[in-house]
Amino acid sequence: MNTTVVLFTSDLRLHDHPPLRAALGAADRVVPLFVRDDGIDAAGFACPNRRAFLADCLTDLDEGLRDRGGRLVVRSGDVVEGVRAVAHEADAEEVHMAAGVSGYAHAREERLRTALEKDGRALRVHDAVVTALAPGAVVPSGGDHFAVFTPYHRRWSQQEIRGVLAAPRTVLVPDGIRSEPVPSRAEAEKAGGVSEGLAAGGEREARRRLTAWTRGGLAHYDERHDDLAGDATSRLSPHLHFGTLSPAEAVHRARAVGGPGAEAFVRQVCWRDFHHQVLAARQDAAAADYRPRHDRWRPETEALADIEAWKAGRTGYPVVDAAMRQLRHEGWMHNRGRLLAASFLTKTLYVDWRVGARYFLELLVDGDLANNQLNWQWVAGTGTDTRPNRVLNPVRQAHRYDPDGTYVRRWVPELEEVGGSAVHEPWKLPDDDRARLDYPGPIVELGEGLARFKEGRGTAG
C-alpha cells in the first residue's frame, strides 16, 4: 500500500480541501500532518489569541479525521525537518500542501521542495486553497499584479471560482506514525494573554456560522455592514484566516442566496484575494511602504504617550476607544472600527502605520499578514488607496455609524450614563457632568492633528 502526506497550514478543514483530495486520490493511505512551526514563534507571530483559536481548530480537525477512521499527526519544530521525518517514517512518495503568499511561506515551500527531492520525494503545492482565486490568476496587461482594487474586482468577478469539493468519507492513516498531543485551548489559556471574549475556532463552528449567516444577516449586509452597534458582519474572518472555511465555498454559498447583500459580501472576499495577490507579488510590502511617500512620521519615542493611550482606549475620542477596547476583549474588531482606529493613529496622531499593524497582530485572532499590513497601508496612504490623503474624522464617523452611541456605551462604560449622540463628544458636556466622568479629554485636537498630517506629508491635500 502506498502512502502520501498532507501538510496542513492555513487550511485546517476537511471540506473543500484540494490537497487532501489529491493525496487521497494518489495513495491508499494518507498522513494528515500539522507542524507547530518554530519559525512562526521566532517571528513573533504566534500571539496568545491565535494560539488558542488554533488549538480549537486542530482539536476539531483531529476529531473530524477520527470520525473518518483517521487522526491528525502533530509535530513541533522546524517544518522541513518535521515533514521529512514523517515522510520517511511513512515511506511516502509525495507531500501535498496549499500554496502560501508571504515571503516566509514561499521560502518554506522552496526549502521543503529541495529537501524532499534530495530524499527522492515530491512536493505538490496546490493553488486556490487559502484564497478563492490564486494570486496571479488574473493580472493586468504588462504587470504581475493589480495595484488598484476596482479593476481587479472587475476581472476577478468575471472568473469562474472552482467547484467545492466534498469532505472525504474515509481517511486511512498508517499505523506507527508518532504524534504529539493535539494542543488544547486550556493549554493556551493557561499560558496567559488570551482575550476574555475570544470566539471558538474549528471547522464545525465555521460551518455553523456560515450557515447561520447565509440564512440571516447576509441578505442585509450591503445596508448594515458599517453599523457598529448592530454587529451585522459575518465574523468569518478568523475562519478564513485559519482555513476552517474555504473562501471558494463562501463565495458559492453567498451567490446561491443572491441579492445586494450577497454581492457586497463577495466583494469583501475579493478584497481579501486582492491583498493576497499584492503581497504575493510584493512580499516586501509586509514591512515596507507599498507606495513610498517619504512621510516624516513622528518618532516613536516622541509619540509614546499617545501610542499608549491609543492602545489602552483612552484617547478621549469615544468611538476610537470603543474599537480598541473591543479588540482587547475579543481579539477581534468591527471593520469600521479598524478603519477609524488606524486612521486616528496614522493621520491624527501621525504615527507610523507599522506601529499600529504590529499591535493589531499581537491581538487579532484573524491577524493575517496580507490583510492586516495592506489594510493598514491603505489607511495610512502608503498602500493601494487611490485617495491617500483622506482622513477619517472620528466624530463625524461616530455620528454616522453609531448614531445613538450604543456601540460606544457597550465598550466604554465610563460613558454609559451619557445619553444619545452626546456620548461621541463628552468634552462638550456641562462642566459638572464632565467632572463626574472617569474619562480623559481628547489627547489632540482634530484640527491640530490634521495640520500636522498635512505638514508631514508636504501637501495641502
Image (cartoon, helix red, strand yellow):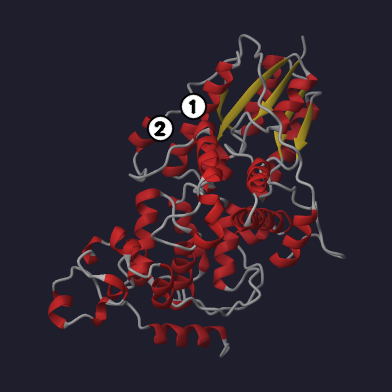
The vertical placement of 406 against 343, above or below, is above
* Residue located 71% across and 36% down the image: 164
Secondary structure state at the residue bearing disc 2: helix
Mark 1 or 2, nearer chain start: 1
Q: Is residue 250 visible?
A: yes
Instruction: Tell me where residue 295 appears, x and y as whole percent.
Output: 56, 78
Contact between labelled residues 2 and 1, with CB atoms less than 8 Å apart:
yes
Q: Is residue 367 visible?
A: no
* Residue located 45% across and 68% down the image: 340
Q: Quadrant of residue 427?
A: bottom left
Q: Is residue 190 left or right of residue 277?
A: left
Which residue is at the far right?
142
Instruction: Tell me where residue 357 appears, x and y as whole percent.
Output: 50, 60
Q: Where is mark 2, residue-wise?
A: 185
The disc labelled 1 sits on which kind of residue?
Thr
Which residue is at the far bottom?
460
Secondary structure state at the residue bearing disc 1: helix
Q: Is residue 246 left or right of residue 62?
A: right
The vertical placement of 286 against 87, above or below, is below
Instruction: Tell me where residue 143 appears, x and y as whole percent.
Output: 83, 64
Q: Quadrant of residue 20?
A: top right
Q: Residues within 10 Å of mark 2 (few under 14, many from 20)?
A: many
The vertical placement of 63 against 445, above or below, is above
Q: Is residue 207 left or right of residue 323?
A: right
Circle number at residue 104: none
Circle number at residue 59: 1
The disc labelled 2 sits on which kind of residue?
Arg
